[in-house]
Amino acid sequence: MTKPIFSDVGEREITRAILEQFASQLSAYVESDVIVVGGGPAGLMAARQLASSGIKVLLIERNNYLGGGFWIGGYLMNKVTFRAPANEVLDELGIPYIEHSPGLFVTDGPHACSKLIAAACDAGVKFLQMTVFEDAVIRDERIAGAVINWTPVTALPREITCVDPVAIESRFVVDATGHDAAVCRRLEERGLIKLRGYGAMWVERSEDLVVEHTGEVYPGLIVCGMAVTTVYGLPRMGPTFGAMLLSGKRAADIILGQIHVEEAVSERHSKLSSQGESE
Ligand code: 48H
C-alpha cells in the first residue's frame, strides 16, 4: 500500500470543523463596533480602513462573492478606471495600473478587486456572505444594528417559507449597498429619512460630490459609495471607481472620529468619578 498524501481526517470531523468555527465567529460578532452592509468597493474600503485601526468590523453581503461591481468596468469589459488622486489608494493596496492619459488610470478588474478583498481580510474584517440586510435595529432614535436573513430565504416564494430573521448589534452601520441604498431605503419606509434617487451621468461633478456627501444620514448610520448618489440625488459617475474608494475611506474616518470622541468623553467621566470617590 502506498502512503496516503493527505491526513487521516473523515467527513464528520470536516463538518464539525466548519460548524464550530462558523458558530464561534458568528457568536463573537453578534455584537461588533461596525456592521458594513454591502461588499462592493466602497464597503470593502470602509471595512478595511476601520479594521486596520483596530475596530471590530462585520461585513454582510447578499451575494456569495464579494466585490460588487468592482470586478468589471463598463459594458462588461473587465478594465476599471480611476481619476487622480485615487491612484494613491491603488499604490497603497499594491494594485498595478497604467496611466492611460494625464490623470486617468486603468487596471484589471479581477486584480484590483481581489487585492481589495485580500486587504480587507488581512486587516481583520469578518464576513457573512449570502446574508441580506432586511431591517435596522433602532434604539433611542439611533441605529443600533441590523436584522439579517439568509439570501436564499428571501429568494423563496412566501407561501413555502416563513423564516424569521435574526438581529445583530453594533455601534455604527455603514450603508454601502450601491444604487439600492438598502439600509437608507428601509429608514425611508419608516419615515425617518427621505431619499432623492440618483441623477443623470456627469462624472466631472459626481465624484467630488459623492466624497463630499459621504457621512451620517441618521444617528449611527453612515452612507458611502454609490448609495450616496441615491440618498442625495447626485449625478452618477459611470464606470469609474475613484469616488467609491475615497468615499469608503471617508466613511471610516467619520466613524473613527466619533469613536475617538466617545472614548475621550467616557475616559473623562471615569476620571471625574474616580476623583469624586477619592475625595
Ligand atoms: C446585503 C447587499 C444588499 C442587502 C445590496 O454595487 P456595489 O459595487 O456598490 P459600491 O457603492 O461599492 O460601488 C458602486 C460601483 O460598483 C458602481 O456600480 C458604479 C461606480 N456605478 C456608477 C453608475 O453610474 O452606475 O456593491 C454593493 C454591494 C453588492 O455586492 C450587493 O450585492 C450588496 O452591496 N447589497 N448586501 N444586503 N440588502 N443590497
Image (cartoon, grey):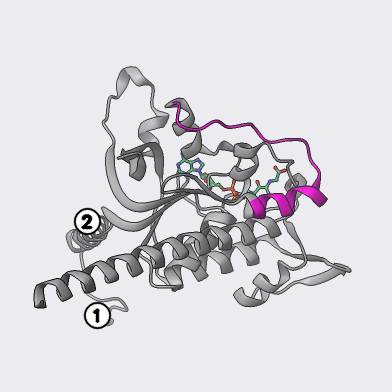
For the image, the number of numbered tags is 2
Locate residue 264, reporting x and y percent. 35, 69
Closer-to-camera residue (100/204):
204
Q: Which amino acid, mark 2?
A: Ser
Residue 164's image quarter? top left
| In this rendering, position of residue 86 left or right of residue 202 | left
| In this rendering, position of residue 101 left or right of residue 223 | right
Q: Residue at x 42, y 45 (%)?
A: 219
Task: Say few, some or many: other residues with alpha carbon within 10 Å of mark 2 (under 14 / 14 to 19 / 20 or more).
Answer: few
Task: Say few, some or many: other residues with alpha carbon within 10 Å of mark 1 (under 14 / 14 to 19 / 20 or more).
Answer: few
Local SS, label 2: helix
Residue on which the image places disc 2: 27
Query: Which numbered marker is on residue 137?
Result: none
Magenta-colored span? 191-212
- Residue lying farthest bottom? 3
Q: Residue at x 73, y 42 (%)?
A: 236
Q: In this rendering, which labeled residue sits more in front, label 2 or label 1? A: 2
Q: Residue at x 70, y 40 (%)?
A: 234
Local SS, label 1: loop
Residue 263's image quarter? bottom left
Locate residue 63, reporting x and y percent. 47, 45
Disc 2 from disc 1: Cα separation: 44 Å
Locate residue 161, reporting x and y percent. 30, 24
Residue on which the image places disc 1: 1
Q: Which amino acid, mark 1?
A: Met
**Which badge, 2 or 1, is on the more N-terminal residue?**
1
Q: Is residue 209 magenta?
A: yes
| In this rendering, position of residue 264 left or right of residue 225 | left
Closer-to-camera residue (185/9):
185
- Residue lying farthest right? 101
Locate residue 110, reporting x and y percent. 64, 62
Task: Give the answer, above or below, for where 154 lies relative to 54.
Answer: above
